[in-house]
Amino acid sequence: MLSNLVKQMFPPKDIIGVDIGNYAVKIVCFTEEKKVLKLKDWGYIPLAIKADVPPEEKKAIISQEIKTYIKKKNLQARYAAASISGNAVIVRYVKLPKLTRKELDLTIAVEAEPFIPFDIKDVNLTYSILNDAAEEGEPKIDTVLVAAKREAVQDKIDIISGAGLDPLIIDVDSFALETLYDRIAPKGENNSVLLLNIGQKVTNLSIITQGVTRVVRDIFIAGSTLDKAIAKALKTDAASADNLKKSRSVLVSDEDKEGAIENFDKEGITVSKAAASVLKDLYTEVSRSIDFYLSQGVEHSISKIMLSGGLANLGNVTKFLSMEFKVPVEIVNPLAFLPEQPKNMPKDVLPALAVATGLALRSMKDWEE
Ligand SMILES: Nc1ncnc2c1ncn2[C@@H]1O[C@H](COP(=O)(O)OP(=O)(O)OP(=O)(O)O)[C@@H](O)[C@H]1O
Ligand SMILES: [Mg+2]
């Protein structure tokens, strides 16, 4: 009884970030010891749920997976932060008339409506005022609008609650990536950085200049697009294509290409061609966002790309993208800021933990406030 009371007054500080993706659930749990963050545990749970499983059943399966993981690891966490992305949320950086917060609270739905492509009744609308601005001599404010589909938010709440956790925060994938980047960025960085988190269905894109986000967008070209292209080219199924993605690579140098030809590696060449063509499509879409960003009369062009998500593991993907974009491409180590690096973590899990790490950091921060 007493211990329960103590728990309520001083709830355990372990908070977990749960990134419920289309391909895998990623879990990161930090604990704080004498003001030093430590990785308590991490989880990577591949889902492989068949497409024809009804949504409610799918949610129950994911809840159960998370529950089993927590039990197995004996985590004491009560609170979790999860996130949404893709079709479920729209983030817009817009100028609005200079109103007080009180006035905006009353009028935000009307002000935001032109920028939100969803029915305003179906979304949770939140906003944040960034700074004062001016437009054609009129005083304005720069704001970020976030419109999240209620149903998608509820789905995440249901999954987390179903796993026996309290959904403390439902964030947005891109914001979690920013929280993370804030932690791992070199101090005093002056340049613009492009974050690309390439997952299964969605690629999250953010452009950050001196710690301020300028563009956020989700693009629907990612791992499953590669699977489809590979499956089509080799007349195989998506599961085999997924495996080929992991064992093969994009042939970039002339040496690689010639080597494949000499070895009559037809499969390798076909996989590479299919992957390269999808990555080129992704490049085109990302370039549109970069052009949009540059059209705002900014001082900095993109100086580097930070790559995360499971697809960051695709062989030669950094080489390929840096040749396309003509800037350096680095793979994110989301745990780089920890004094101690985890042991026994498969190499390809690390970049996939980016969103979950950002979520765990975000919830720690909010907790302290
Ligand atoms: N070693 C690897 N080599 C190549 N691709 C890989 C590797 N490991 C994972 N992937 C790919 O990464 C993708 C999954 O990445 P991630 O876990 O970031 O997605 P997700 O968060 O579940 O999806 P989404 O965010 O789109 O809902 C899959 O397409 C998977 O095949
Ligand atoms: Mg993801």
Image (spheres, rainbow, N blue to C red):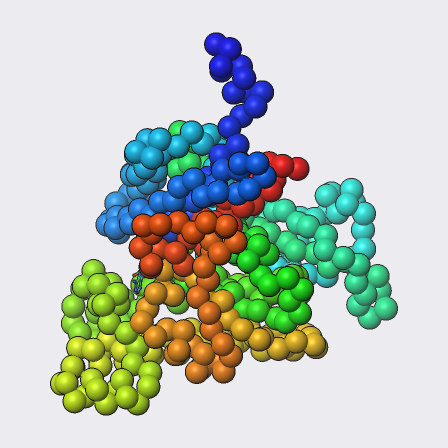
Side (left or right) of 163 relative to 111: left
The answer to whether residue 316 of the structure is visible from this angle is yes
Which residue sits at x=72%, y=43%? 105
- Could you say which is closer to the camera, residue 355 or residue 279? 355
Q: Is residue 340 above or below residue 218?
A: above
Q: In this view, does 344 lie above or below 161?
A: below
Which residue sits at x=54%, y=69%? 194
Name the image quarter holding the C terminus: top right
> Residue 286 location, x and y as percent?
49, 73
Q: Is residue 185 above or below residue 19?
A: below
Which residue sits at x=64%, y=54%? 145
Side (left or right) of 101 relative to 225: right
Q: In this view, does 303 lie above or below 90?
A: below
Ligand number 1: quarter of image: bottom left
> Residue 131 location, x and y as percent?
76, 57
Which residue sits at x=20%, y=60%? 239
The quadrant holding residue 197 is bottom left
- Could you say which is closer to the camera, residue 186 or residue 362? 186
Q: Residue furthest right?
A: 137
Side (left or right) of 267 relative to 115: left
